[in-house]
Amino acid sequence: MASLAPDVAANLHTERANPHWVRLGGDHKLDHIPGEDGWPVLGTTLMQLADPLGFQKRMVDTYGPVFRTRSFGRRGVNLIGADANELVLFDRDKLFSNEQGWGPVLNLLFPRGLMLMDFEAHRVDRRALSIAFKPEPMRAYCGVLNSGIASAMENWGGRMRFYDAIKALTLDTAASSFLGLPLGPEADRLNKAFVDMVQASVGVVRKPLPFTKMGRGVAGRRLMVEYFGRLVRERRANPGQDMFSQFALATRDDGSLLPEDVVVDHMIFLMMAAHDTITSSATVLFWQLAKNPEWQDRLRAEARAVTGGDGLPLAYEDLGRMELTEMAFKEALRFMPPVPNMPRRALREFEFGGFRIPAGTPVGISPAAVHADPAHWDSPEVFDPMRFTPDKVASRHKYAWAPFGGGAHMCLGLHFAYMQVKLLANHILTRFEVRMQPGAEPSWQAWPIPKPRDGLRVEMRRIC
C-alpha cells in the first residue's frame, strides 16, 4: 500500500478494490442462520463494541453457538466455542482467509501485516521475518530490555496511571530493541499515530474522512510509512543488531530482499503488536496482582530466587525458571485477551454446528468468550494462575485458550511477549509493591485492544 496512488489506497479495504475476494452473493444467503440484524444502518455494531462478552453471551443463550449478526455494514456468522476456535485457527482444510477477514477492518491501517496474509504468501514472509526471533537476536533484545526497564524504574513510584506508564515504557523499549535507537522527541508523535491507527480499526465510519477516527488513523499511518521507510534505507546501508536491521536484510526463498514497502508494512504492524498488545496484557496482569497480593508476593519471591535479589537483571538463560510468572501471565491473557475476537472469511462452503455456511461468509470467533466459558474454566471470573499447571493444561481442550491465535498464524512474537512480561514483572515487583488506589473498580474499553478507561490508577510503594 505504501507505493499505491492515494485514490487506490483510500479504497483498499473495499470489495470493489479486491476483485479476488470471495463474495457471499447477497445477505439472503445467511437467512437460515439464527440471529439479529440490529438497528437500521448501524446493525449490531454498537452493541458489540459496547459489551462484546455480554452481547455474545446473550446471543449464545438465545440462538446457540452459531449465530448471525450485522456489524460494520456486513452480515456475518459468529462461531463460539473451543471447537470453533480449532476449526478456524488450525484451518486444516484451508477454508478461511485472514486477508479477507481482517482486510475490510485493517487494510487502510496495517496492510500486509502477517496477520492479514494467507497461505503461501504468509509462509514466505513469515519465514523471512522469523530470523529476528532466533535465540541470538532474542538474547540481544533481553539485554536491551533489562537496561531500558531498569532505567525507567528510577522515575516510577507513588500514585500513577499504570497503563499510561507501561505504554510509554513498552514503546520506548520496543524502539530500543526493535529499532536500535531511542525515539527521543519523536516518541509522542509516533505513540499518537499508533493510538490513532488502533482506534480507527473500530471506527463506525470506514472511510478516511477528515475528523473521523479512520481519517486520523490513516494520517497516523502516513507518518509511520515516512518514518520507517527512511529507517529501512539507513539500516540496509549500515545494519546493526536490532530487529529492524534483521527485517531490512531479510530475504525470501530465492535470496531476494523483501521490498522496502513490505518491510515497512511488517515493521509497523509488529511495532504495534509489540507494544500495544503487551501494554494491554501487562496492565491486566498487574491489575490482578494488585487485587491479589498473595500472587504478587509469590511472583516477587520467584524473581528474587531467580535473579539473586532486588532490582537485578533477569538473564536470558533464566527466563525459563520464571514458571509462576509465566503461569500468571497466561492467566492474565485468559482473563482478558488483547485480541478478543478474530475475523476470517470462508473461501468455500462448510458445515459447523448443524448449519451450512456458504462461501464468502464473514466468520468471527471469540477467544475471549471461550476464555470465560465455565465448561472449560471453573469460576472463570476468578484470577487463578494455577489453571496453567502442566496437568491442567494437558486435560483441557487445546483451543480453550487461544490468545496468540493458532495454526500457521500463531503469533510470531509470542516468545518476545513472554520475555518482556517476565522482565517487567522482575523489575517492577522487586522494586515496588503495587496497590490499587482507593475508589471504584476500573471500567475497561473492550475494543479494539482492551484498556482501562481511567488508565488503571495504582500506588507504587518502593521496597528497593
Image (cartoon, grey):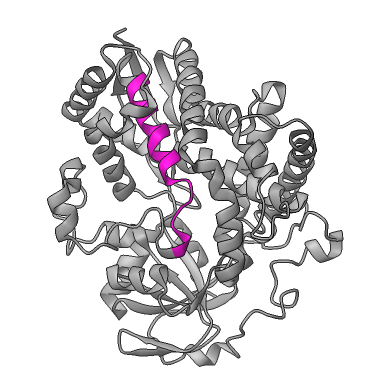
Measured from the top left, where is residue 42 in percent x and y? 57, 70
Q: Quadrant of residue 332?
A: top left
Q: Quadrant of the C terminus?
A: top left
72 on left or right of 154: right
Measured along the vertical axis of the image, is residue 438 above or below residue 50?
above
**Quick check: 98 left or right of 310?**
right
Q: Is 410 a magenta residue?
A: yes
* Residue 153 image-quadrant placement: top left
Q: Residue at point 49% right, 13% down?
A: 151
Q: Is residue 179 above or below residue 58?
A: above
Q: How many marks?
A: 0
Residue at x-position 67% and y-position 52%: 251
Residue 278 coordinates in the image, percent (x, y) = 45, 39
Residue 109 figure quarter: bottom right
Tell me if residue 111 is in the magenta stretch.
Answer: no
Give percent across and percent down for residue 55: 37, 65
**Residue closest to the eye, 424 or 309:** 309
Looking at the rendering, the stretch of residues picked out in magenta corresponds to: 408-427
Residue under the point 64% across and 60% down:
253
For residue 337, side relative to residue 43 (left or right): left
Residue at horizontal 83 percent and vertical 60 percent from the top: 4
Q: In front here: 74 or 443?
A: 74
Would you say the magenta stretch is mainly helix, strand or loop?
helix
Quadrant position of the N terminus in the picture: bottom right
| Residue lying furthest top | 464
Q: Position of residue 136 (x, y in %)?
A: 49, 34
Q: Quick check: can you spot residue 275?
A: yes
Residue 288 lies left or right of residue 206; in this view the side is left
